[in-house]
Image (cartoon, rainbow, N blue to C red):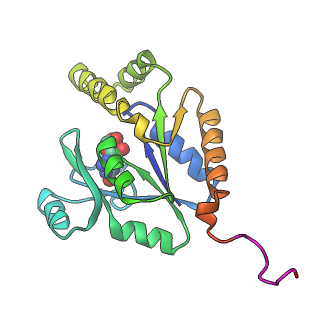
């Protein structure tokens, strides 16, 4: 199983994913590669693999990415090798990627991909959250709100919708989604019975 989680900036994706991972040690965060400058407190290889444009373009040319996109003027991509490492280790990868990347991933994977769109409670609340961060000027906030409206247009492509009005409740819903997905016959493949013939 691979979890694809998309939601507009301000929907609370980072806290949501953080709580989710704290509750289930089978989940592993898929570390993307980006050209965005490292922020204070970030560690290379933990939040992202930070590279320059040349290195990123080389990876694109080598088809190293499952998907990649330009988000807020920086490039971001999911490296195939990162995903393979996680699934080989028996982990369930969590992809925190934008809609442009999400659509590329949705086109490539089958029922093993569980897609979730995380909504903020309302547009007003999204604006309030983006403003209260205090890190961005009004132009950046306006741009993020415009991007968010465009992203929500793609939400129907995702299998599950979760509204993040209460973090704990949203995480519980997500855990229920994971539990349900794990019971799907198409995921299990063969009936979960002993091999002895009952006859
Ligand atoms: P930030 O720079 O704030 O960490 O992330 C900005 C946006 O880039 C977020 O919406 C995040 O989901 C998206 N993003 C992060 N990694 C990837 C990736 O590998 N591919 C794509 N398409 N988007 C990503």
From this view, report whether residue 166 is shown above or below residue 76: above
Quarter of the rendering containing residue 185: bottom right
Percent coordinates x, y for residue 29 in the rendering: 47, 57
Residue 25 appears in view: yes
Instruction: Say whether residue 196 is left or right of residue 71.
Output: right
Residue plotted at (34% across, 43% down): 98
Q: Is residue 50 above or below residue 155?
A: below
Q: Quadrant of residue 195?
A: bottom right
Query: Which quadrant is the C terminus positioned in?
Result: bottom right
Stretch in magenta: 191-198
- Where does residue 196 sit, x and y in percent of width and height? 82, 84
Q: Nearer the viewer, residue 111 or 5?
A: 111
Magenta span contains residue 151: no
Height in image: 65 above or below 162? below
| Residue for point 56% across, 71% down | 90
Q: Main structural element of the magenta stretch: helix, strand or loop?
A: loop
Farthest residue in the front direction? 199
Depth order, front residue of 135/185: 185
Q: What residue is at 45 percent from the left and 45 percent from the top?
A: 5
| On screen, residue 111 above or below 135 | below
Residue 155, given in percent of the width and then of the height, sits at: 41, 35
Which residue is at the front of the view, 148 or 135?
148
* Residue 84 horizontal/vertical position (percent): 42, 71
The answer to whether residue 40 shows anywhere in this view is no
Examine the image and state in which quarter residue 73 appears.
top left
């Amino acid at each position: 199983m691979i979890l694809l989680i998309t939601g507009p900036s301000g929907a609370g994706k980072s806290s949501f994913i953080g709580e989710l991972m704290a509750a289930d040690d089978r989940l592993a965060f898929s570390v993307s590669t980006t050209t965005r400058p490292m922020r204070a407190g970030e560690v290379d290889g933990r939040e992202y693999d930070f590279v320059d444009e040349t290195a990123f373009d080389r990876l694109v040319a080598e088809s190293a990415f499952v998907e990649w996109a330009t988000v807020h003027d920086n490039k971001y991509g999911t490296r195939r090798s990162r995903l393979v490492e996680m699934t080989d280790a028996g982990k369930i990868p969590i992809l925190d990627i934008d809609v442009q990347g999400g659509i590329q991933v949705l086109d490539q994977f089958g029922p093993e991909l569980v897609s979730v769109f995380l909504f903020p409670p309302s547009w007003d609340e999204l604006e309030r959250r983006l403003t209260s961060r205090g890190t961005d000027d009004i132009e950046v906030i306006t741009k993020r709100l415009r991007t968010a409206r465009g992203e929500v247009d793609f939400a129907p492509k995702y299998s599950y919708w979760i509204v993040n009005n209460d973090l704990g409740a949203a995480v519980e819903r997500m855990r229920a989604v994971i539990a349900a997905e794990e019971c799907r016959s198409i995921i299990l493949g063969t009936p979960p019975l002993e091999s002895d013939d009952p006859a």
